Image (tube, rainbow, N blue to C red):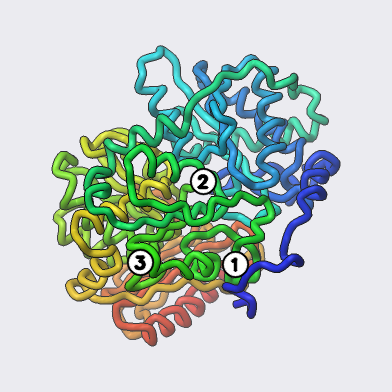
Amino acid sequence: MNERAGTPAQESDLIDVTALVAAYYALKPDVAVPAQRVAFGTSGHRGSSLTVSFNEAHIAATTQAIVEYRDSQGITGPLFIGADTHALSAPAYTTALEVLVANDVRVLVDEFDDYVPTPALSHAILAYNRGGHGDQADGIVVTPSHNPPSDGGFKYNPPHGGPADSDATSWIAERANEHIANGLRDVQRSEPSAVEAYDFRGAYVEDLAHIIDMQAIKASGIRIGADPLGGASVGYWGAIRDTYELNLTVVNPKVDPTWRFMTLDWDGKIRMDPSSPHAMASVLDHQNDYDILTGNDADADRHGIVTPDAGLMNPNHFLAVAIDYLSTHRPEWRSDARIGKTLVSSSMIDRVVGALGRELWEVPVGFKWFVPGLIDGSVAFGGEESAGASFVRFDGTVWTTDKDGILLALLAAEILAVTGKTPSQRYAELTEQFGAPAYARVDAAATPAQKAALSRLDGAAITASELAGEPILATLSHAPGNDAAIGGVKVVTENAWFAARPSGTEDVYKIYAESFLGAEHLAQVQAEAKAIVDAAIA
């Protein structure tokens, strides 16, 4: 923990925007250097121009690769494109438009030259593809999500509207690196003039009445504070207020690519993470000014929920409350629709879902796993412990297939408006019924070889029979819901569990752990988890 965590950013913490953008154009990547290659993680390619990991060549090559991919898949409809408020997003957006237009792709951009949240782009793709046009649309979001101001990001969403799967991203990344190695010889570019306008904000905001009880929120008169944290939702919250006549205040409407108004995250960096009490410290100063106070990250795919009685809710706690509420207030949902969670999310969700009589669907980390179920309605809710979730409409049909932080923030307001209880008060009631788990994530040092070994580890390689005094009931290397590899291991006892996964960016592995027997037992689980994993990957 950095000693300045939670304190206001100082001038020395801020990026030099001019230097950052200049480096985007000036520095040329060498794909022989692994760190300078195009590489898609769980949410696109991310990097910084200053480290030659997010530069003009990366975006030109990746966009050309996306054009070639959509050709190979027979995708002939329009491509929706939007960007967030990061400094590198604007130049990357322009580069992408130049390549798309030169390749004769029909491109739809925001009608008002506004920022475009990830959920609004997913919503646009799905709306078009439901329209019976005879072709299929896809999209690009230029965003590194909650990453620091020096970073850029580039995400591709195919016609299903959600994050591209690994087959698609692997192909795109490999082809993009080939283009860079060839000096961009086969990359076409021209002035981005032939584009069409689309009202992302209007289409999204007007459709909210089909998934959130906006009339109940209006009638309650509850005071809502919404902080975009300088991100792409900044224009959406005012539109939501005006469209539905809510008692809603946009707490901080400022947009500044340096994010000088932020407080520092746990490691002393500026990071727009609405689930972090350190990054949200300035928002928490207003927790008593509103009945519900929310935050979103830069592309609005994550949510933070603040209540007067509890402050910032742990994302796991709010997911459990959201699932409990929706399952009892959406009578048109299919009775057999499953509730999806990632395997590092709290077991409180398991207990809530079990009591509701619904089926739990536990998948590896990554929102992409929920996409098919959300589309066909067989999954009613999909959520991640990192404060990302989406769910289906009142009638059980798909809303978005990417995470939607605006939606979950509005759901918090609906819960209070309908039940008279804040989400944190409802969580306290759930703990009385199911117990109060202690949950944490820590990092442990690991060499690249050890990380590789962990990613391939089979559950059978875990030889321990006990964890923190309890018999081990399961050792998993594949998710119970879909049998997909989890890229690590999860160990489960009656009252506790841990999961270990290698970091994609640092020489550490992540240990997620939870105990229903208290904080001391959790600490014991964490210590023994490290010993168990270290022995298995030695």
Name the residue nearer the viewer: 279 or 440. 279
Report the residue marked by disc 2. 234
> What is the x, y in percent for residue 212?
28, 43
Q: Residue at x 35, y 73 (%)?
A: 310
> What is the x, y in percent for residue 337?
21, 43
Between marks 1 and 3, how big is the CA–CA gap?
A: 19 Å
Report the residue marked by disc 1. 263
- Number of marks drawn: 3
Residue 179 location, quadrant:
top right
Between marks 2 and 1 in the image, the one whose residue lies nearer the viewer: 2
Q: Amino acid at mark 1?
A: Thr
Indicate which disc, 2 or 1, sits on the residue closer to the N terminus: 2
Q: Residue at x 74, y 19 (%)?
A: 190
Between marks 3 and 2, how big is the CA–CA gap?
A: 21 Å
Name the residue nearer the viewer: 372 or 112. 112
Q: Which of the labelled discs sits on residue 347, or is there none?
A: none
Q: Which of the labelled discs sits on residue 307, or is there none?
A: 3
Image marks 2 and 1: residues in contact by CB distance under 8 Å: no
Compared to residue 105, the image places residue 457 above or below, namely below
Q: Secondary structure at mark 1?
A: loop
Between marks 2 and 1, how big is the CA–CA gap?
A: 18 Å
Compared to residue 356, the image places residue 513 above or below, namely below
Q: Residue furthest right?
A: 26
